[in-house]
Image (cartoon, rainbow, N blue to C red):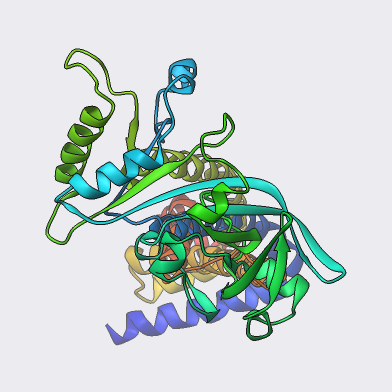
Protein backbone atom coordinates (compact mmCIF):
# COMPACT_ATOMS: atom_id res chain seq x y z
CA UNK A 1 0.00 0.00 0.00
CA UNK A 2 2.81 2.36 0.93
CA UNK A 3 4.64 1.60 -2.30
CA UNK A 4 1.50 2.29 -4.34
CA UNK A 5 0.95 5.62 -2.62
CA UNK A 6 4.59 6.53 -3.15
CA UNK A 7 4.34 5.74 -6.87
CA UNK A 8 1.16 7.81 -7.18
CA UNK A 9 2.77 10.70 -5.30
CA UNK A 10 5.81 10.63 -7.57
CA UNK A 11 3.50 10.44 -10.57
CA UNK A 12 1.65 13.51 -9.33
CA UNK A 13 4.93 15.41 -9.00
CA UNK A 14 5.90 14.35 -12.53
CA UNK A 15 2.50 15.50 -13.79
CA UNK A 16 2.96 18.91 -12.18
CA UNK A 17 6.43 19.22 -13.71
CA UNK A 18 5.00 18.31 -17.13
CA UNK A 19 2.29 20.94 -16.76
CA UNK A 20 4.83 23.54 -15.76
CA UNK A 21 7.23 22.62 -18.52
CA UNK A 22 4.61 22.73 -21.29
CA UNK A 23 2.69 25.88 -20.40
CA UNK A 24 1.19 26.57 -23.82
CA UNK A 25 0.06 22.98 -24.35
CA UNK A 26 -1.39 22.90 -20.84
CA UNK A 27 -3.22 26.20 -21.31
CA UNK A 28 -4.79 25.12 -24.60
CA UNK A 29 -5.85 21.81 -23.07
CA UNK A 30 -7.38 23.51 -20.02
CA UNK A 31 -9.17 26.15 -22.06
CA UNK A 32 -12.00 23.87 -23.16
CA UNK A 33 -12.61 22.56 -19.64
CA UNK A 34 -12.47 26.10 -18.24
CA UNK A 35 -15.07 27.33 -20.74
CA UNK A 36 -17.30 24.30 -20.12
CA UNK A 37 -17.23 24.61 -16.32
CA UNK A 38 -17.67 28.38 -16.65
CA UNK A 39 -20.81 27.90 -18.74
CA UNK A 40 -22.32 25.32 -16.41
CA UNK A 41 -21.50 27.13 -13.16
CA UNK A 42 -22.47 30.57 -14.46
CA UNK A 43 -25.86 29.32 -15.67
CA UNK A 44 -26.49 27.47 -12.40
CA UNK A 45 -25.42 30.49 -10.36
CA UNK A 46 -27.53 32.97 -12.32
CA UNK A 47 -30.65 30.81 -12.44
CA UNK A 48 -30.42 29.86 -8.76
CA UNK A 49 -29.81 33.50 -7.82
CA UNK A 50 -32.68 34.67 -10.01
CA UNK A 51 -34.94 32.01 -8.53
CA UNK A 52 -33.92 32.91 -4.98
CA UNK A 53 -34.48 36.64 -5.53
CA UNK A 54 -37.87 36.08 -7.16
CA UNK A 55 -39.01 33.62 -4.52
CA UNK A 56 -37.86 35.95 -1.72
CA UNK A 57 -39.84 38.79 -3.27
CA UNK A 58 -42.84 36.58 -3.89
CA UNK A 59 -42.79 35.42 -0.28
CA UNK A 60 -43.73 39.01 0.65
CA UNK A 61 -47.06 38.33 -1.06
CA UNK A 62 -47.79 35.73 1.59
CA UNK A 63 -48.06 31.97 1.20
CA UNK A 64 -51.43 31.90 2.98
CA UNK A 65 -53.00 34.88 1.20
CA UNK A 66 -55.68 34.76 -1.48
CA UNK A 67 -55.97 37.63 -3.96
CA UNK A 68 -59.36 38.33 -5.52
CA UNK A 69 -59.25 40.02 -8.92
CA UNK A 70 -60.32 39.82 -12.54
CA UNK A 71 -57.27 38.05 -13.95
CA UNK A 72 -55.87 34.62 -13.02
CA UNK A 73 -52.14 34.53 -12.35
CA UNK A 74 -51.60 31.26 -14.20
CA UNK A 75 -53.16 30.03 -17.44
CA UNK A 76 -56.11 31.40 -19.35
CA UNK A 77 -54.08 33.58 -21.71
CA UNK A 78 -56.36 32.72 -24.63
CA UNK A 79 -59.45 33.94 -22.77
CA UNK A 80 -58.32 37.49 -22.07
CA UNK A 81 -61.53 39.01 -23.44
CA UNK A 82 -63.56 36.96 -20.99
CA UNK A 83 -61.42 38.21 -18.08
CA UNK A 84 -61.45 41.79 -19.37
CA UNK A 85 -65.25 41.82 -19.25
CA UNK A 86 -65.37 40.59 -15.68
CA UNK A 87 -66.46 43.13 -13.05
CA UNK A 88 -63.70 44.57 -10.90
CA UNK A 89 -63.62 44.02 -7.17
CA UNK A 90 -65.60 46.66 -5.27
CA UNK A 91 -65.20 48.19 -1.86
CA UNK A 92 -68.71 47.06 -0.92
CA UNK A 93 -67.72 43.50 -1.79
CA UNK A 94 -64.65 43.87 0.37
CA UNK A 95 -66.82 44.98 3.31
CA UNK A 96 -69.15 42.01 2.76
CA UNK A 97 -66.22 39.58 2.59
CA UNK A 98 -64.71 41.13 5.71
CA UNK A 99 -67.96 40.70 7.66
CA UNK A 100 -68.95 37.20 6.47
CA UNK A 101 -65.68 35.24 6.36
CA UNK A 102 -64.92 33.09 9.38
CA UNK A 103 -61.62 31.62 8.13
CA UNK A 104 -59.92 34.97 7.48
CA UNK A 105 -57.30 36.44 9.79
CA UNK A 106 -57.04 39.72 7.87
CA UNK A 107 -58.78 41.26 4.88
CA UNK A 108 -57.67 44.32 2.91
CA UNK A 109 -58.68 46.30 -0.18
CA UNK A 110 -56.13 47.87 -2.52
CA UNK A 111 -55.85 49.59 -5.88
CA UNK A 112 -53.14 51.51 -7.73
CA UNK A 113 -52.87 54.52 -9.98
CA UNK A 114 -49.61 55.66 -11.57
CA UNK A 115 -48.26 58.91 -12.96
CA UNK A 116 -48.78 60.99 -9.81
CA UNK A 117 -46.69 63.89 -8.49
CA UNK A 118 -45.50 64.71 -4.97
CA UNK A 119 -44.42 68.33 -4.37
CA UNK A 120 -42.49 69.85 -1.47
CA UNK A 121 -41.60 73.51 -1.80
CA UNK A 122 -39.86 73.97 -5.14
CA UNK A 123 -38.97 70.27 -5.43
CA UNK A 124 -41.16 67.53 -6.79
CA UNK A 125 -41.13 63.83 -7.69
CA UNK A 126 -43.12 62.75 -10.74
CA UNK A 127 -44.15 59.33 -12.01
CA UNK A 128 -45.14 58.23 -8.51
CA UNK A 129 -47.56 55.33 -8.01
CA UNK A 130 -50.41 55.84 -5.57
CA UNK A 131 -51.46 52.75 -3.66
CA UNK A 132 -54.81 53.12 -1.93
CA UNK A 133 -55.08 50.70 0.98
CA UNK A 134 -57.22 49.80 3.94
CA UNK A 135 -56.08 49.21 7.52
CA UNK A 136 -55.31 45.46 7.37
CA UNK A 137 -52.94 45.91 4.43
CA UNK A 138 -49.92 46.05 6.76
CA UNK A 139 -50.86 42.73 8.39
CA UNK A 140 -50.95 41.02 5.00
CA UNK A 141 -47.93 42.62 3.29
CA UNK A 142 -45.72 43.17 6.37
CA UNK A 143 -44.41 46.59 5.35
CA UNK A 144 -40.88 47.59 6.34
CA UNK A 145 -41.07 51.04 7.92
CA UNK A 146 -37.69 52.79 8.23
CA UNK A 147 -39.05 55.74 10.19
CA UNK A 148 -42.43 56.81 11.47
CA UNK A 149 -45.48 54.55 11.62
CA UNK A 150 -48.34 52.97 9.72
CA UNK A 151 -51.80 54.51 9.49
CA UNK A 152 -54.08 54.33 12.50
CA UNK A 153 -57.53 52.83 12.14
CA UNK A 154 -59.12 56.27 12.59
CA UNK A 155 -57.00 57.64 9.74
CA UNK A 156 -58.05 54.86 7.35
CA UNK A 157 -61.71 54.97 8.41
CA UNK A 158 -61.98 58.74 8.64
CA UNK A 159 -60.43 60.06 5.43
CA UNK A 160 -57.07 60.93 7.01
CA UNK A 161 -54.85 63.15 4.85
CA UNK A 162 -51.69 61.19 5.61
CA UNK A 163 -49.04 59.44 3.48
CA UNK A 164 -46.42 56.73 3.77
CA UNK A 165 -43.71 57.31 1.18
CA UNK A 166 -41.27 54.96 -0.56
CA UNK A 167 -37.48 55.24 -0.57
CA UNK A 168 -37.17 57.08 -3.89
CA UNK A 169 -39.58 59.77 -2.70
CA UNK A 170 -37.98 60.49 0.68
CA UNK A 171 -34.49 60.24 -0.82
CA UNK A 172 -35.32 62.68 -3.63
CA UNK A 173 -37.18 65.23 -1.52
CA UNK A 174 -35.74 65.02 2.00
CA UNK A 175 -32.58 62.91 2.01
CA UNK A 176 -33.24 60.65 5.01
CA UNK A 177 -36.29 58.83 6.40
CA UNK A 178 -36.01 60.67 9.72
CA UNK A 179 -36.18 64.10 8.04
CA UNK A 180 -39.27 63.01 6.12
CA UNK A 181 -41.62 62.41 9.05
CA UNK A 182 -44.06 65.23 9.78
CA UNK A 183 -43.48 67.09 6.52
CA UNK A 184 -46.53 68.43 4.68
CA UNK A 185 -46.47 67.83 0.93
CA UNK A 186 -48.80 68.50 -1.97
CA UNK A 187 -49.99 65.29 -3.57
CA UNK A 188 -52.10 65.77 -6.68
CA UNK A 189 -53.11 69.23 -5.48
CA UNK A 190 -54.08 68.14 -1.94
CA UNK A 191 -52.16 68.65 1.29
CA UNK A 192 -50.96 65.49 3.03
CA UNK A 193 -48.78 64.91 6.10
CA UNK A 194 -46.12 62.21 5.89
CA UNK A 195 -46.37 59.83 8.85
CA UNK A 196 -44.15 56.99 7.61
CA UNK A 197 -41.14 56.29 5.39
CA UNK A 198 -40.52 52.79 4.05
CA UNK A 199 -37.18 51.04 3.80
CA UNK A 200 -35.56 50.67 0.42
CA UNK A 201 -36.73 47.46 -1.24
CA UNK A 202 -34.60 47.58 -4.38
CA UNK A 203 -35.50 46.32 -7.83
CA UNK A 204 -38.66 44.24 -7.82
CA UNK A 205 -38.54 41.46 -10.44
CA UNK A 206 -41.99 40.17 -9.51
CA UNK A 207 -43.64 43.43 -10.46
CA UNK A 208 -46.32 43.11 -7.79
CA UNK A 209 -45.36 46.02 -5.54
CA UNK A 210 -42.82 48.73 -6.41
CA UNK A 211 -42.72 50.28 -2.96
CA UNK A 212 -39.65 52.43 -3.60
CA UNK A 213 -41.53 54.59 -6.10
CA UNK A 214 -44.90 54.53 -4.33
CA UNK A 215 -46.91 56.42 -1.77
CA UNK A 216 -49.46 54.63 0.39
CA UNK A 217 -52.71 56.53 0.93
CA UNK A 218 -55.74 55.62 3.07
CA UNK A 219 -58.51 54.34 0.83
CA UNK A 220 -61.10 57.06 1.53
CA UNK A 221 -58.55 59.83 0.94
CA UNK A 222 -57.32 58.17 -2.25
CA UNK A 223 -60.86 58.00 -3.66
CA UNK A 224 -60.91 61.79 -3.76
CA UNK A 225 -57.93 61.63 -6.15
CA UNK A 226 -58.73 58.57 -8.26
CA UNK A 227 -62.08 56.80 -8.08
CA UNK A 228 -61.66 53.04 -7.76
CA UNK A 229 -64.70 52.55 -10.01
CA UNK A 230 -62.88 54.00 -13.01
CA UNK A 231 -62.34 51.89 -16.15
CA UNK A 232 -58.53 51.74 -15.83
CA UNK A 233 -58.40 50.84 -12.15
CA UNK A 234 -58.11 47.19 -11.17
CA UNK A 235 -58.80 46.86 -7.42
CA UNK A 236 -58.02 43.70 -5.49
CA UNK A 237 -59.30 42.13 -2.31
CA UNK A 238 -56.59 40.43 -0.24
CA UNK A 239 -57.57 37.81 2.33
CA UNK A 240 -55.13 36.16 4.73
CA UNK A 241 -56.05 32.77 6.16
CA UNK A 242 -56.53 32.45 9.89
CA UNK A 243 -54.16 30.28 11.91
CA UNK A 244 -54.72 26.54 11.45
CA UNK A 245 -56.86 27.24 8.35
CA UNK A 246 -55.65 25.96 4.98
CA UNK A 247 -55.67 28.15 1.90
CA UNK A 248 -57.97 25.64 0.24
CA UNK A 249 -60.58 25.99 2.99
CA UNK A 250 -60.30 29.78 2.81
CA UNK A 251 -60.76 29.74 -0.98
CA UNK A 252 -63.84 27.53 -0.71
CA UNK A 253 -65.48 29.86 1.80
CA UNK A 254 -64.39 32.95 -0.12
CA UNK A 255 -65.80 31.58 -3.38
CA UNK A 256 -69.17 30.97 -1.72
CA UNK A 257 -69.29 34.48 -0.22
CA UNK A 258 -68.35 36.18 -3.51
CA UNK A 259 -70.87 34.18 -5.53
CA UNK A 260 -73.53 35.16 -3.01
CA UNK A 261 -72.52 38.84 -3.07
CA UNK A 262 -72.49 38.92 -6.88
CA UNK A 263 -75.75 36.94 -7.05
CA UNK A 264 -74.41 34.27 -9.41
CA UNK A 265 -76.71 31.38 -10.30
CA UNK A 266 -75.52 27.82 -9.57
CA UNK A 267 -75.03 27.19 -13.31
CA UNK A 268 -72.97 30.34 -13.89
CA UNK A 269 -69.19 30.31 -13.84
CA UNK A 270 -67.19 32.40 -11.39
CA UNK A 271 -66.65 35.93 -12.68
CA UNK A 272 -63.63 36.46 -10.46
CA UNK A 273 -60.19 34.89 -9.95
CA UNK A 274 -58.88 33.54 -6.66
CA UNK A 275 -55.09 33.71 -6.89
CA UNK A 276 -52.49 32.37 -4.52
CA UNK A 277 -48.71 32.05 -4.46
CA UNK A 278 -48.66 28.31 -5.19
CA UNK A 279 -50.37 28.91 -8.57
CA UNK A 280 -47.19 30.35 -10.08
CA UNK A 281 -44.75 27.85 -8.53
CA UNK A 282 -45.23 25.22 -11.26
CA UNK A 283 -44.64 27.79 -13.98
CA UNK A 284 -41.54 29.08 -12.21
CA UNK A 285 -40.15 25.57 -11.73
CA UNK A 286 -40.68 24.85 -15.43
CA UNK A 287 -39.04 28.12 -16.47
CA UNK A 288 -35.97 27.64 -14.28
CA UNK A 289 -35.74 23.99 -15.30
CA UNK A 290 -35.62 25.05 -18.96
CA UNK A 291 -32.95 27.65 -18.24
CA UNK A 292 -30.81 25.11 -16.39
CA UNK A 293 -31.29 22.57 -19.18
CA UNK A 294 -30.29 25.04 -21.89
CA UNK A 295 -27.26 26.29 -19.98
CA UNK A 296 -26.25 22.74 -19.08
CA UNK A 297 -26.43 21.68 -22.73
CA UNK A 298 -24.13 24.54 -23.75
CA UNK A 299 -21.74 23.66 -20.93
CA UNK A 300 -21.72 19.95 -21.84
CA UNK A 301 -20.85 20.76 -25.45
CA UNK A 302 -17.96 22.90 -24.26
CA UNK A 303 -16.88 20.15 -21.85
CA UNK A 304 -16.88 17.56 -24.67
CA UNK A 305 -14.50 19.79 -26.62
CA UNK A 306 -12.40 20.24 -23.50
CA UNK A 307 -12.42 16.50 -22.79
CA UNK A 308 -11.03 15.80 -26.27
CA UNK A 309 -8.29 18.32 -25.55
CA UNK A 310 -7.44 16.60 -22.25
CA UNK A 311 -7.52 13.17 -23.91
CA UNK A 312 -5.15 14.45 -26.61
CA UNK A 313 -2.62 15.75 -24.11
CA UNK A 314 -2.84 12.49 -22.16
CA UNK A 315 -2.09 10.44 -25.30
CA UNK A 316 0.94 12.66 -25.90
CA UNK A 317 1.98 12.23 -22.25
CA UNK A 318 1.73 8.45 -22.50
CA UNK A 319 3.86 8.53 -25.65
CA UNK A 320 6.50 10.70 -23.99
CA UNK A 321 6.72 8.47 -20.89
CA UNK A 322 6.59 5.09 -22.58
CA UNK A 323 10.08 4.07 -21.43
CA UNK A 324 9.35 5.29 -17.87
CA UNK A 325 6.17 3.19 -17.85
CA UNK A 326 8.24 0.19 -18.95
CA UNK A 327 10.75 0.71 -16.12
CA UNK A 328 7.95 1.00 -13.54
CA UNK A 329 6.30 -2.18 -14.75
CA UNK A 330 9.67 -3.93 -14.78
CA UNK A 331 10.22 -3.18 -11.08
CA UNK A 332 6.75 -4.41 -10.15
CA UNK A 333 4.21 -1.66 -10.82
CA UNK A 334 0.83 -3.22 -11.52
CA UNK A 335 -1.57 -2.23 -14.29
CA UNK A 336 -4.01 -0.58 -11.91
CA UNK A 337 -1.23 1.60 -10.48
CA UNK A 338 -0.16 2.76 -13.95
CA UNK A 339 -3.79 3.40 -14.87
CA UNK A 340 -4.42 5.32 -11.65
CA UNK A 341 -1.32 7.42 -12.33
CA UNK A 342 -2.60 8.75 -15.64
CA UNK A 343 -6.18 9.05 -14.46
CA UNK A 344 -4.91 11.16 -11.55
CA UNK A 345 -3.08 13.43 -13.95
CA UNK A 346 -6.18 13.78 -16.16
CA UNK A 347 -8.36 14.57 -13.15
CA UNK A 348 -5.80 17.11 -11.96
CA UNK A 349 -5.90 18.86 -15.33
CA UNK A 350 -9.69 19.04 -15.26
CA UNK A 351 -9.73 20.24 -11.65
CA UNK A 352 -7.34 23.07 -12.54
CA UNK A 353 -9.51 24.01 -15.51
CA UNK A 354 -12.66 23.76 -13.38
CA UNK A 355 -11.11 25.92 -10.65
CA UNK A 356 -10.24 28.55 -13.26
CA UNK A 357 -13.80 28.49 -14.59
CA UNK A 358 -15.37 28.73 -11.12
CA UNK A 359 -12.94 31.47 -10.12
CA UNK A 360 -13.96 33.47 -13.18
CA UNK A 361 -17.65 33.04 -12.28
CA UNK A 362 -16.93 34.14 -8.70
CA UNK A 363 -15.18 37.31 -9.86
CA UNK A 364 -18.08 38.15 -12.19
CA UNK A 365 -20.64 37.59 -9.41
CA UNK A 366 -18.75 39.97 -7.12
CA UNK A 367 -18.56 42.58 -9.89
CA UNK A 368 -22.29 42.34 -10.67
CA UNK A 369 -23.37 42.33 -7.01
CA UNK A 370 -21.28 45.43 -6.25
CA UNK A 371 -22.63 47.40 -9.22
CA UNK A 372 -26.36 46.52 -9.19
CA UNK A 373 -28.95 45.72 -6.52
CA UNK A 374 -29.37 42.15 -7.78
CA UNK A 375 -27.80 39.67 -5.35
CA UNK A 376 -25.99 36.72 -6.91
CA UNK A 377 -25.33 33.66 -4.79
CA UNK A 378 -22.65 31.07 -5.58
CA UNK A 379 -23.60 28.37 -3.11
CA UNK A 380 -21.50 25.48 -1.80
CA UNK A 381 -23.75 23.08 -3.71
CA UNK A 382 -22.90 24.76 -7.00
CA UNK A 383 -19.17 24.63 -6.19
CA UNK A 384 -19.51 20.94 -5.31
CA UNK A 385 -21.30 20.34 -8.62
CA UNK A 386 -18.43 22.07 -10.45
CA UNK A 387 -15.83 19.92 -8.70
CA UNK A 388 -17.78 16.73 -9.35
CA UNK A 389 -18.19 17.64 -13.02
CA UNK A 390 -14.46 18.30 -13.32
CA UNK A 391 -13.58 14.94 -11.76
CA UNK A 392 -16.02 13.04 -13.97
CA UNK A 393 -14.71 14.82 -17.07
CA UNK A 394 -11.14 13.96 -16.06
CA UNK A 395 -12.00 10.27 -15.62
CA UNK A 396 -13.79 10.08 -18.97
CA UNK A 397 -11.07 11.99 -20.82
CA UNK A 398 -8.18 10.06 -19.29
CA UNK A 399 -9.59 6.54 -19.22
CA UNK A 400 -8.53 5.40 -22.72
CA UNK A 401 -4.98 6.88 -22.54
CA UNK A 402 -4.56 5.42 -19.02
CA UNK A 403 -5.86 2.03 -20.16
CA UNK A 404 -3.46 1.97 -23.14
CA UNK A 405 -0.56 2.89 -20.85
CA UNK A 406 -1.47 0.14 -18.39
CA UNK A 407 -1.47 -2.51 -21.16
CA UNK A 408 1.99 -1.67 -22.52
CA UNK A 409 4.48 -4.52 -22.68
CA UNK A 410 7.36 -3.58 -20.31
CA UNK A 411 10.13 -4.87 -22.62
CA UNK A 412 8.75 -3.05 -25.68
CA UNK A 413 8.14 0.06 -23.61
CA UNK A 414 11.71 0.15 -22.25
CA UNK A 415 13.23 -0.34 -25.71
CA UNK A 416 11.13 2.49 -27.14
Image quadrant holding the N terminus, namely bottom left
Q: Is residue 330 visible?
A: yes
Q: Residue at x 44, y 73 (%)?
A: 328
Q: Nearer the viewer, residue 374 or 400?
A: 374
Tell me where residue 215 appears, x and y as whole percent: 61, 61
In this image, 139 relative to 202: left or right? left
Which residue does the image show at 56% across and 52% down from the upper left? 222
Q: Is 339 situated left or right of 312 in this image?
A: left
- Taking 292 as reference, is 119 above or below it? below
Q: Quadrant of residue 118?
A: bottom right
Q: In the figure, 44 relative to 340: above or below?
A: above
Q: Nearer the viewer, residue 324 or 58?
A: 58
**Residue 36 seen anywhere in this rendered image of the structure:** no
Number of on-image labels? 0
Asked where in the image residue 9 lies, by quadrant, the reply is bottom left
The quadrant of the picture occupied by the C terminus is bottom right
Q: Is residue 192 left or right of residue 392?
A: right
Q: Please, which residue is most extreme toward the left here?
A: 244
Residue at image position (34%, 32%) is: 273
Nearest the camera: 26 or 104? 104
- Please determine whether, in this image, residue 334 is positioned above or below residue 45: below
- Report x, y in % for residue 371: 72, 69
Amino acid sequence: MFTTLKILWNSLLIALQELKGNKLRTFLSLLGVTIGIFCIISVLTLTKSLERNIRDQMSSLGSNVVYVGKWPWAGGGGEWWKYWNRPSAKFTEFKAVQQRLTNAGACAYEYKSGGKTVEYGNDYMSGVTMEAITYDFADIQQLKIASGRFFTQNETNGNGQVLIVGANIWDGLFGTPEQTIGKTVSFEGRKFTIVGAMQRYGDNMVGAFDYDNSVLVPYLAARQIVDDRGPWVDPAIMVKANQNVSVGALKDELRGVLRSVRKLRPTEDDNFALNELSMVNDGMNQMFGSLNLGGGAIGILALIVGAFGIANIMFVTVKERTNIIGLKKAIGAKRNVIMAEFLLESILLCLIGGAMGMGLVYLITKLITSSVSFNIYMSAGIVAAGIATSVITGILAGFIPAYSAARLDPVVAIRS
